[in-house]
Amino acid sequence: MERVITAERCGICEEEKERGIHILHMFICEACERAIVQTEPEQTEYDRFVEKLRDINKPRLYS
Ligand SMILES: [Zn+2]
């Protein structure tokens, strides 16, 4: 049986990656996940991540 690997677009680096995790409905690639885990809250990468999460939680009233 053949396993089909599909790439998904990472919500952080916006690159297509085959491996990663899903937080809510956003895909995060392994590299970004690792970066987030290792990043202290006061660092910019974390801020960027939190901002992205806020974006996907925003109700789209004005689309
Ligand atoms: Zn990524």
Image: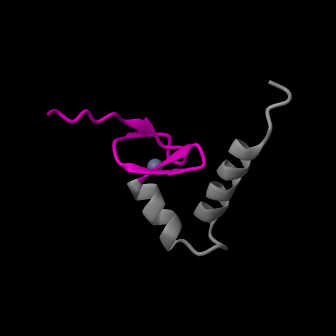
Residue 41 quadrant? bottom right
Residue 57 spot, x, y in % from top left: 73, 46
Quarter of the picture holding the N terminus: top left
Residue 26 spot, x, y in % from top left: 56, 44
Q: Quick check: 17 left or right of 49?
A: left
Q: Residue at x 50, y 40 (%)?
A: 14
Rendered position, 16 above or below 30: above
The segment highlighted magenta reads 1-29
Residue 43 quadrant? bottom right
Rendered position, 48 above or below 26: below
Q: Is residue 10 magenta?
A: yes
Q: Residue at x 40, y 51 (%)?
A: 20
Quarter of the picture holding the C terminus: top right
Direction left: furthest residue: 1
Q: Residue at x 58, y 61 (%)?
A: 45
- Image label count: 0
